[in-house]
Image (spheres, grey):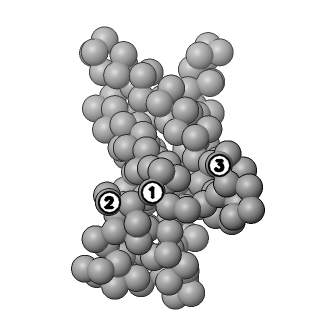
Amino acid sequence: MTAEWIAVLALRWTLIVVFVGFAIAKLPKSEGAGFADYVRQPPVLRWGPRLLGARLFSIAVALAELAVAALLFLGTFSATLGFLGAWAAVAVLSITLSMLLFTDRWQEQNGFPFLGEGAEFLIKDAAIAAAAYMLAVHESARLLAG
């Protein structure tokens, strides 16, 4: 085992745990309405609660996050699935981070760049997205190497 292999394994499993945790957090009935509040403004997501209702959309997103976690896990054994899972994680986290651009999550009295309610919840995704990107770069190279 090389240091790089251990680092990639640590990134992969950290992302799996994070995506499973994200999904579990969206499953309780009480979470649907709260989640819908976060996704009402961003163009990529605002259709969800309108079309499916808050609860069903929350469950649909949770299932998508579980699918990403499954692809990340299967990527341990398959370069193709690892590639798909890592880039899916980057895409999901990019969409999540876009909520910072389309929602008013800054402190009312101070404005940008002072994080307000909800922004703290989203800003951590920048670090998680960086981890997903690192894994995606690794998986791309792994896939190209055959």
Amino acid tagged 2: Pro
- Specify the quadrant that holds the N terminus: top right
Amino acid tagged 3: Phe
Q: Which residue is mark 1?
A: 102
139, above or below 23, in the image: above
Q: Which residue is mark 3?
A: 112
Task: Tell me if I can see residue 74 in this picture.
Answer: no
Disc 1 crowd rating (10 Å Cα; few below 14, some 14-19, many 20+) is: some
Q: Position of residue 55 (x, y in %)?
A: 41, 84
25, above or below 52, in the image: above
Answer with mark 3 or mark 2, whichever residue precedes in sequence.
2
Q: Which residue is mark 2?
A: 43
Answer with mark 2 or mark 1, whichever residue precedes in sequence.
2
Spatial separation of the CA atoms under disc 3 and disc 1: 13 Å
SS for dot 2: loop
Residue 65 appears in which quarter of the rendering? bottom left
Query: What residue is at 70 percent from the left and 60 percent from the top?
Result: 107
Q: How many marks?
A: 3
Q: Residue furthest front?
A: 109
- Specify the quadrant that holds the C terminus: top left
Residue 3 appears in which quarter of the rendering? top right
Q: Position of residue 96 (x, y in %)?
A: 47, 53
